[in-house]
Image: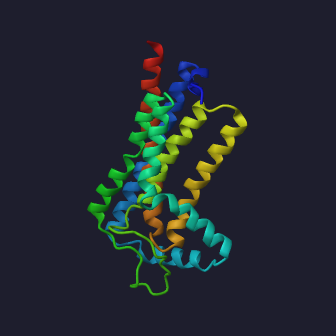
Amino acid sequence: MKRHVHDATFSPRGVQRREAVGFAVAVAALGIFAGLFAIVRANQSAAADIEITLRMQRRRHPFLAQLLALASWPGFPPQSGLIPASLAGGLWFLGFRLEAVFQFFAWGTSGISLFFKSLMRRARPSNDHPQIRVAVARIGGSSFPSGHVLNYMGVFGFFAYLIHSHLRPAAIRRIVISALVSLIGLVGPSRIYLGHHWATDVTASYMLGTAYLIGLTTCYRRVREYFDSR
């Protein structure tokens, strides 16, 4: 990878406009998360969540099942710890020290997930709903929010941002980013399809992860600009 920050090609006013849009999106995402939190806390989403899960699980094509299972695989231990640590460590080894630090901060979504799980303590889909198939996996704790989705948004989302900012040539950059974005997009449906999470868990995590990612990338850009200007 080569050092290159795309914001440098924009005027200061253009950068400010982009950051203002990002701030508005983050606030909206947090608002949606707060609304979902309140709805789930009041137990007002159960019927819709069950219906969504059953509709998704009626699609039993072998390829779809394998694809969604594969999308969830990086989020299970031990790879759920090895992959984020390896990304940060690899960046550090390659000399991208600041990027490595922020890539490690991207893993902070794990702590955020544990915090909200401890507040909600929502039961996962289980034998209480015999129509729902639950794939055997190492899962535990509260269902809300989805730790898989939240961690993917932080870890893979920030890594995709770094790839967008630094990787050359463009063809390789597009391939890598497409793979990362596809993984992030698939993990949410996979958690529902496998019977490990409810749709509201997944949606809430996408919203919270979006806000966290916007905040993290904004902080990174400003710190990067500070060091580049010295």
Left or right, 155 with respect to 184, comes to left
Q: Residue 118: x percent and y percent? A: 27, 61
The quadrant where residue 8 appears: top right
Q: Nearer the viewer, residue 212 or 81?
A: 81
> Where 87 sits versus 184, above or below?
above
Residue drawn at (48%, 42%), measured in percent from left and top?
Answer: 87
Q: Residue 5: x percent and y percent? A: 56, 26
> Where 67 sits versus 176, above or below?
below
Residue 69 seen in the figure: yes
Q: Nearer the viewer, residue 98 or 194?
A: 98
Q: Residue 117: x percent and y percent? A: 31, 61
Residue 214 seen in the figure: no
Residue drawn at (37%, 55%), measured in percent from left and top?
Answer: 34
The quarter of the image holding the N terminus is top right
Residue drawn at (45%, 70%), measured in percent from left and top?
Answer: 198
The quarter of the image holding the C terminus is top left
Left or right, 76 with respect to 60, comes to left
Q: Residue furthest top?
A: 230
